[in-house]
Amino acid sequence: METEKLFRTKTGFCHILPDKIVLTREGKIGEIANITVGNSVTRILIIYSIFSLALFYFSFSIFKTGQIFQSILFFLLGIYFSYGIFNSLNNSATPIIERRKIKSVKLKKGVSGLTRTRFEVFFEDTNGKLKKRLIILPGTLENGKEEEEKAVKIMIEEKLILN
């Protein structure tokens, strides 16, 4: 009897075990993810905050010189980054999720050539807070359709998502 099921992700592999989900990083993309994100999204949120503040500053500076169009453009980009920050506050980069702590798993289909298909795993962390872990699947150029079908089949078999 098989106790572990495995599928590829954007940065490595997802191991579905009877008691937990383990995400591992492999190759160059996995190494870069380890350096930039690690097991926390705090560093990325700080970088986004700096970009957002800089865009608002440039928007105001340019507005004072009378360049309205560029000012509005920078302001809208600042709002976009701020929106991303607030949407990501409850995200987690934890590599291990206990299955008993999982509240729900949602499949978000990607738009071919634009976005990647992903699973959103909602779980309770060690502090009892509801967190979201994204499991991003490989893209179109990396045999993404076949990997998506395999991953969805595994998630349904393991009763993590409903079909």
Image (cartoon, grey):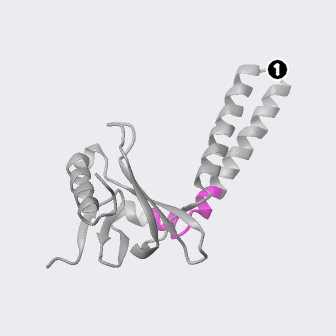
SS under mark 1: loop
Q: Residue at x 31, y 47 (%)?
A: 139
Q: Residue at x 82, y 20 (%)?
A: 66
Q: Determine which quarter of the picture holds residue 99.
A: bottom left
Residue 17 placement (x, y as % from top left): 30, 76
Q: Is residue 86 left or right of residue 145?
A: right
Instruction: Let me know if residue 68 is in the magenta part.
Output: no
Number of numbered labels in the structure image: 1
Q: Residue at x 33, y 64 (%)?
A: 12
Residue 114 placement (x, y as % from top left): 38, 37
Residue under label 1: 66
Which is the main secondary structure of the residues drawn in magenta?
helix
Q: Which residues are magenta?
A: 33-45
Q: Residue at x 20, y 50 (%)?
A: 146
- Up/down of 69 relative to 111, above or below: above
Q: Is residue 21 left or right of residue 70?
A: left
Q: Residue furthest left?
A: 1
Amino acid type of the residue tagged 1 in the rendering: Gly
